[in-house]
Image: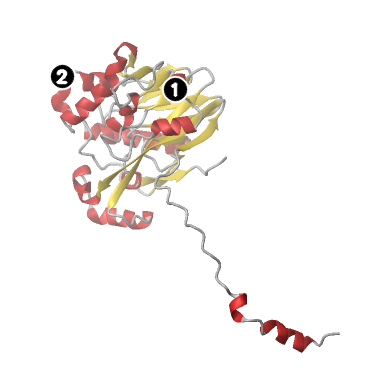
């Protein structure tokens, strides 16, 4: 039998260099640079809803007092701290939603274009990653015709990106962006007007309109709900299947943390700021009272959640990610 102590000594007296010789380092993996195309899918009754991430926009915080007519620096500072914002920008996701009813494949809004808003324009990558093809889309339902909601209708050459789709949009919004007599009312000016016309122009023979002033079922199980103010024909869409329902809004809010806490703050980019506030308050109150699932083009990704009261305002509670 080998005595324990000498054995331990023998092990610890091995040459140090042999025990700790460095191994050749493997080559570092290159940085990817961009995230994978973003999509997330849920079921609502018998309907399948897929959120698509088109990208994001960011606004220098110095511009915020011009964006919010009722801006209060102290209030925003507290909200920034509560939300753990550390960068000098206000971030704004841009998304869209595929609604597969089994009978129709509809798209609610369709993203932007990188040439107009850098950081947007990835919707078609996300659509492909989610398993759908543009030619399968038979309807694009627009909440309104702003660039990050509608420029995905066309490709880089200005051709239809969804060759078999009709474009469904309120009559008020279509007229606002295409009638020369309305041009002086557009807060953002000629660039936005040109983008809107570029988006819907190739679909001139495939546009179906409805009245934004009342609820209208635009496809079976999908109803346009008035949300006028941001634009004259701005709407949300309610999807219903069985006993379940969900609302998808366009621009009821842009900066979720700030606007939900201060839903009465007016925006300089709204065509009718007071009407937009009224629409926001009505929408948020309904969602909170009914505990309805909500999605929104600029809600934090993956943009499914619920609205709950919080003091004088509201909070967005994300729906937990589920495979």
Measured from the top left, where is residue 183 in percent x and y?
Answer: 15, 24
Asked if residue 227 shows in the view, the reply is no
The label on residue 2 is none
Identify the residue shown where x is 36% and y is 22%.
Answer: 161
Is the residue marked by circle 2 packed among few (<14), some (14-19), or many (20+) residues within 10 Å?
Answer: few
Q: Nearer the viewer, residue 287 or 294?
A: 294
Measured from the top left, where is residue 6 in percent x and y?
Answer: 76, 88
From this view, report whether residue 131 is shown above or below residue 254: above
- Mark 1 residue element: strand
From this view, report whether residue 270 is shown above or below residue 314: above
- Structure colour scheme: secondary structure
- Mark 2 residue element: helix
Please state if 65 lies on the left or on the right of 233 as rendered.
left
From this view, report whether residue 47 is shown above or below residue 257: above
Q: Which quadrant is home to the C terminus?
A: top right
From this view, report whether residue 69 is shown above or below residue 242: below
The first of marks 1 and 2 along the sequence is: 1
Q: Nearer the viewer, residue 237 or 153?
A: 153
Q: Nearer the viewer, residue 99 or 170?
A: 99
Measured from the top left, where is residue 207 in percent x and y?
Answer: 33, 14
Identify the residue shown where x is 67% and y is 83%.
Answer: 12
Corner quadrant of residue 182: top left
Q: CA distance from mark 1 to mark 2?
A: 30 Å
The label on residue 180 is 2
Corner quadrant of residue 7: bottom right
Asked if residue 91 shows in the view, the reply is yes
Identify the residue shown where x is 25% and y is 56%.
Answer: 74
Is the residue marked by circle 1 packed among few (<14), some (14-19), or many (20+) residues within 10 Å?
Answer: many
* CB within 8 Å, label 1 to label 2: no
Measured from the top left, where is residue 107 in percent x and y?
Answer: 42, 25
How many marks do you count on the picture? 2
The residue where tag 1 is placed is 106
């Amino acid at each position: 039998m080998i005595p324990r102590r000498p054995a331990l000594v023998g092990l610890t007296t091995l040459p140090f260099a042999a025990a700790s010789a460095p191994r050749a380092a493997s080559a570092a993996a290159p940085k990817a640079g961009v995230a994978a195309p973003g999509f997330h899918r849920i079921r609502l009754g018998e309907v399948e809803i897929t959120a698509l991430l088109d990208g994001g926009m960011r606004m220098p915080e110095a511009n915020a007092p011009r964006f919010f007519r009722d801006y209060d620096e102290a209030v925003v500072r507290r909200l920034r701290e509560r939300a753990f914002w550390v960068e000098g920008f206000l971030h704004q996701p841009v998304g869209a939603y595929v609604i597969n009813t089994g009978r129709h494949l509809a798209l609610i809004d369709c993203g932007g274009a990188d040439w107009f808003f850098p950081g947007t324009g990835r919707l078609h990558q996300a659509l492909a990653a989610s398993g759908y093809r543009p030619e399968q889309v038979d309807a694009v339902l627009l909440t309104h015709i702003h660039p990050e909601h509608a420029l995905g209708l066309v490709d880089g050459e200005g051709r239809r990106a969804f060759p078999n789709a009709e474009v469904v949009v309120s009559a008020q919004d279509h007229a606002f962006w295409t009638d020369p007599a309305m041009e002086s009312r557009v807060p953002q000016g000629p660039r936005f007007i040109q983008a809107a016309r570029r988006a819907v122009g190739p679909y001139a023979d495939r546009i179906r309109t409805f009245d934004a002033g009342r609820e209208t079922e635009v496809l079976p199980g999908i109803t346009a709900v008035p949300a006028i103010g941001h634009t004259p024909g701005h709407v949300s869409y309610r999807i219903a299947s069985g006993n379940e329902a969900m609302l998808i809004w366009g621009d009821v809010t842009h900066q979720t943390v700030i606007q939900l806490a201060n839903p009465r703050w007016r925006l300089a980019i709204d065509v009718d700021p007071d009407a937009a506030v009224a629409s926001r308050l009505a929408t948020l109150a309904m969602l909170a009272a009914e505990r309805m699932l909500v999605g929104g083009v600029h809600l934090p990704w993956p943009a499914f959640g619920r609205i709950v009261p919080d003091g004088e305002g509201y909070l967005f509670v994300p729906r937990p990610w589920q495979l």
